[in-house]
Amino acid sequence: DKLFGNTLEVGPGMGVLTKHLQKRRELSLKVIDIDKESIEYLENQNWIKREQLIEGDFLASNLSLLFQEKKFGIIEGSCRTHCVERGF
């Protein structure tokens, strides 16, 4: 497995960072958000697949099942603000 090939974004919100991550072909991306409205918004976008979206509480989820027990990296959603402000 590539380092962080399997990636979970926590708290994607409206998908500002997600849209850019989705373009990275080396990533197997899934996103999780406790906010139903955010998940519903992302479901209506044509650049992300429904099977990549998880509505739920990150802290209460069985994360080992998300990528069939394979290693994965986590991107925490609040990074969006800091990354965008710094031009990353």
Image (spheres, rainbow, N blue to C red):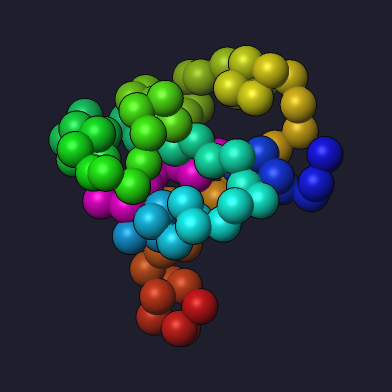
- Name the residue rendered at 70%, 45% in the picture: 5
Describe residue 14's horizontal placement relative to residue 63 as left or right. left
Which one is in front, 24 or 62? 24
* Residue 53 is inside the magenta segment: no
Give the magenta-colored segment's residue range: 8-15
Which one is in front, 63 or 42? 42
In the image, residue 64 sits, relative to residue 2, either above or below, namely above
Give the main secondary structure, helix, strand or loop, of the magenta stretch: loop
Count of marks overlaid on the render = 0
* Residue 14 is inside the magenta segment: yes
- Name the residue rendered at 44%, 31% in the picture: 52
Residue 75 x, y percent position in the rendering:
55, 50
In the image, residue 74 sits, relative to residue 70, either above or below, namely below
Query: Can see residue 69?
Result: yes
Describe residue 88's horizontal placement relative to residue 33 as left or right. right
Which one is in front, 40 or 13? 40
Residue 34 x, y percent position in the rendering:
32, 30
Q: Quadrant of residue 42?
A: top left
Q: Quadrant of residue 80?
A: bottom left
Query: Can see residue 13?
Result: no
Residue 54 x, y percent position in the rendering:
39, 26
